[in-house]
């Protein structure tokens, strides 16, 4: 089985305010560091009641300082929301402070609704549309210093100048993201937990078309999945009720903190609701550790990931820690082996 990593959304629940959710992320990261997980990535979302962190770079610094070995990164920074120079400076700072432990994952989407996206970007420039490629190119130029002759940015230095940008990963849920990652020779992370595109197609496309670059000489693909493990299948199914309801409501455009199991049990589900939950379970792996591994095995065989990144959203923080602990034991994680893995 491939090594495991963690994607954390700093989940807010009806019983856990955002400030506590942030502290829970630091606690979980320490736990993951001891268990042998390879990386701990933080997502960027805005105006979403169930996600506490809109600024992964701040959480990365806090978590890297609180852990010893595990790589810490963004899963990801939503590049349309940020000036490329700011991204370069922040992540060069993180790399300078925690050399060899930082990852820069980049996303193409704004990570929010249209109005919030406008509020984030309206003072950056007046342009509309998808300018991700332009921003990605500019970000890499702050590292390579290949601006055209007489370009005004040749007089600007991204500080700290002696620290490199950390390894760059492009995140995606489509064939386009896979193709772009391959063309620019960067790492690729596929979001199976919300993608409608076939994961195997995207991962194989990335490997087939990968072009070695100054960023990577060989392809490296991460498969991000949603999973919930517990001591028994029945207990895992009970924990998953919160995630089931949250996903159901999100599909209706209703965003809320993660509900408790009791709140989820009391919800007046219709037969149509239960059918939607059943369909959504194709993106959520639930059960005892052996059950989760068995359910994941066909997907792992089809996609051949170098690494599996797990997102676990449950109401109780202790249950979430236990879920990752059970998966670490099932996948036979080892902290010393994780430290030797290539970036």
Image (cartoon, rainbow, N blue to C red):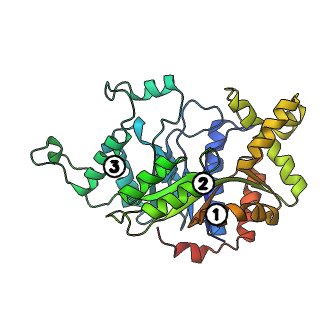
* Residue that numbered label 2 is attached to: 199
258 in relation to 198, above or below: above
138 in relation to 199, above or below: above
Number of dots carrying numbers: 3
Label 3 neighbour load within 10 Å: few <14, some 14-19, many 20+: many
Q: Is residue 219 left or right of residue 139?
A: right
Q: Is residue 257 left or right of residue 341?
A: right
Distance CA(mark 2)–CA(mark 1): 8 Å
Counting from the top left corner in percent of width and height, residue 285 is at 75, 54
Residue 88's disc is 3
Mark yes or no: residue 333 visible. yes
Mark with earlier residue (3, 2):
3
Mark yes or no: residue 65 visible. no
Label 2 neighbour load within 10 Å: few <14, some 14-19, many 20+: many
Q: Nearer the viewer, residue 173 or 115?
A: 173
The residue tagged with tag 1: helix, strand or loop? helix
Residue 212's disc is none
Instruction: Mark 2 and mark 1 in contact? Answer it, CB < 8 Å.
Output: yes
* Residue that numbered label 1 is attached to: 302
Mark with earlier residue (3, 1):
3
Distance CA(mark 3)–CA(mark 1): 35 Å
The residue tagged with tag 2: helix, strand or loop? helix
Furthest residue in direction top, as rendered:
115
Q: Which residue corresponds to the image point at 82% horizontal and 32% vertical from the top-left?
A: 273
């Amino acid at each position: 089985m491939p090594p495991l990593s963690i994607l954390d959304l700093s989940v807010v629940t009806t019983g856990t305010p955002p400030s506590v959710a942030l502290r829970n992320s630091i606690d979980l990261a320490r736990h993951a560091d001891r268990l042998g997980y390879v990386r701990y990535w933080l997502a960027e979302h805005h105006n979403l009641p169930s996600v506490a962190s809109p600024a992964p770079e701040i959480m990365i610094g806090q978590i890297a300082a609180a852990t010893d070995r595990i790589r810490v990164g963004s899963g990801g920074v939503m590049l349309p929301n940020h000036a490329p120079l700011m991204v370069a400076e922040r992540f060069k700072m993180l790399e300078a402070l925690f050399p060899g432990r930082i990852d820069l994952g980049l996303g193409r989407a704004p990570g929010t609704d249209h109005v919030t996206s406008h509020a984030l970007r309206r003072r950056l420039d007046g342009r509309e549309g998808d300018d991700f490629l332009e921003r990605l190119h500019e970000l890499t130029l702050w590292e390579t210093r290949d601006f055209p002759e007489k370009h005004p940015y040749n007089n600007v230095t991204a500080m700290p100048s002696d620290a490199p940008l950390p390894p760059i990963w492009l995140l995606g849920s489509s064939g386009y993201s896979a193709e772009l990652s391959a063309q620019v020779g960067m790492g690729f992370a596929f979001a199976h937990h919300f993608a409608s595109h076939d994961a195997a197609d995207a991962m194989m496309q990335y490997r087939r078309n990968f072009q070695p670059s100054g960023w990577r000489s060989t392809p490296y693909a991460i498969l991000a999945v949603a999973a919930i493990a517990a001591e028994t299948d029945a207990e895992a199914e009970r924990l998953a009720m919160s995630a089931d309801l949250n996903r159901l409501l999100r599909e209706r455009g209703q965003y809320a903190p993660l509900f408790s199991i009791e709140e989820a049990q009391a919800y007046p589900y219709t037969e149509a609701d239960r059918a939607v939950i059943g369909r959504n379970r194709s993106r959520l792996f639930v059960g005892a550790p052996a059950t989760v591994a068995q359910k994941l095995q066909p997907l792992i065989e089809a996609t051949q990931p170098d690494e599996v990144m797990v997102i676990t959203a449950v109401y109780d923080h202790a249950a979430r820690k236990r879920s990752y602990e059970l998966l670490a034991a099932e996948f036979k994680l080892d902290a010393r082996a994780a430290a030797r893995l290539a970036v």
